[in-house]
Amino acid sequence: MNRIDAAFNQLRQLQKKALVGFVTAGDPTYSKSLEILTAMCRAGLDILELGVPFSDPTADGPVIQRSSQRALKSGMTVGEVIRMASGIRKQGIAIPIVLFSYYNPILAYGLERFYRDALDNGVDGLLIVDLPPEESDEMTKKWPGNDLAFIRLIAPTTPLARARTIVETASGFVYLVSKTGVTGSDGLAASPVSEQVSQLKQMTNLPICVGFGISTPDDVAAMSRIADGVVIGSAFERLIETHVDDPDLATILANQVVEYKRAGLER
């Protein structure tokens, strides 16, 4: 069983929801990033989204854009991100790792090579922001198997018929974007998200995780009452940016994970 499926099965038995944390790999440096990620996983993350830095992250707000710039400046590539996943595994971390990327870096790396190297180094899933179902056969037909979960995005503006088409090709979990705009934008309305989660639950048995705009413990508590998991990214990256020169940076991030967990991720 894929680690993602196993994690959600275990959370369901414990009557808990998933805390999914996004961090750009290599921000601010490879070694510091590995230290941060290991600390966050040990502090209680249920799933790690490891961001592949990209020069033109159009779906991301300024905070994550700047994190990509710092990571690229430090020398991060797709290969280095995969190596970081292996490094996390060598620290004894067993939670699922999902690579979050735009399509261009994966295509440039090589589709078959990426699939093989990702699995060989402990990656469990892939989320590609800008690759719709109609175009993704180009990639998945090059994959020699289906062991790498392919997580799909649903936007708040996605029509129901379109959402049904998207979830039919998803695996691992479905990522529901809570609002229009880019990552890190302010404001979060629970009511429309709740309605969309209910609609998606009628289309798929996959877990539904909600992201975009979730930054406070209150946000976490509100969304965990609605969905199977919450995704936090910009709030973590904002802490990295603010404390980038702090020798206790890893501890600061780990403490934030603990605070989110305490906010309530119960069913």
Image (spheres, grey):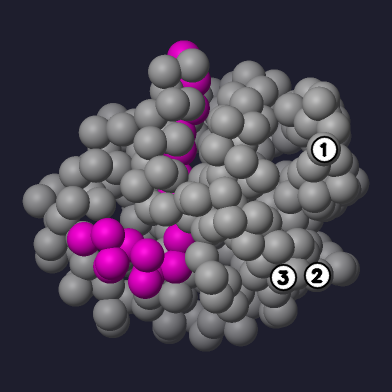
Q: Is residue 208 magenta?
A: no
Q: Which mark is residue 245?
A: 1
Drawn side of residue 256 relative to residue 122, left or right: right
Q: Position of residue 60 (x, y in %)?
A: 65, 69
Could you tell which of marks 3 and 2 lies nearer the N-terminus? Answer: 3
Residue 66 found in image quarter: bottom right
Residue, x 55% and y 57% (percent of image)?
72
- Please tell me whether mark 2 sits on a helix, a strand or a loop: loop
- CA separation in Å, label 1 and label 3: 22 Å
Residue, x 43% and y 44% (percent of image)?
81
Q: Tell me, yes or no, whether the two marked residues, 1 and 2, touch with CB atoms within 8 Å.
A: no
Could you tell which of marks 1 and 2 lies nearer the N-terminus? Answer: 2
Tell me if mark 3 has few (under 14), some (14-19) or many (20+) residues whose alpha carbon lies within 10 angstroms of its own: some
- CA separation in Å, label 1 and label 2: 25 Å
Q: Tell me, yes or no, whether the two marked residues, 1 and 3, touch with CB atoms within 8 Å.
A: no
Closer to us: 107 or 216: 107
Residue 217 found in image quarter: top right
- The amino acid at mark 1 is Asp
- The amino acid at mark 2 is Ser
Drawn side of residue 249 relative to residue 29, left or right: right
The residue wearing badge 3 is 61
Q: Position of residue 107 (x, y in %)?
A: 28, 67
The residue wearing badge 2 is 185
Q: Tell me, yes or no, whether the two marked residues, 3 and 2, touch with CB atoms within 8 Å.
A: yes
Point out the stretch of residues depicted in magenta: 92-110
- The amino acid at mark 3 is Gly
Q: Position of residue 236 (x, y in %)?
A: 75, 45
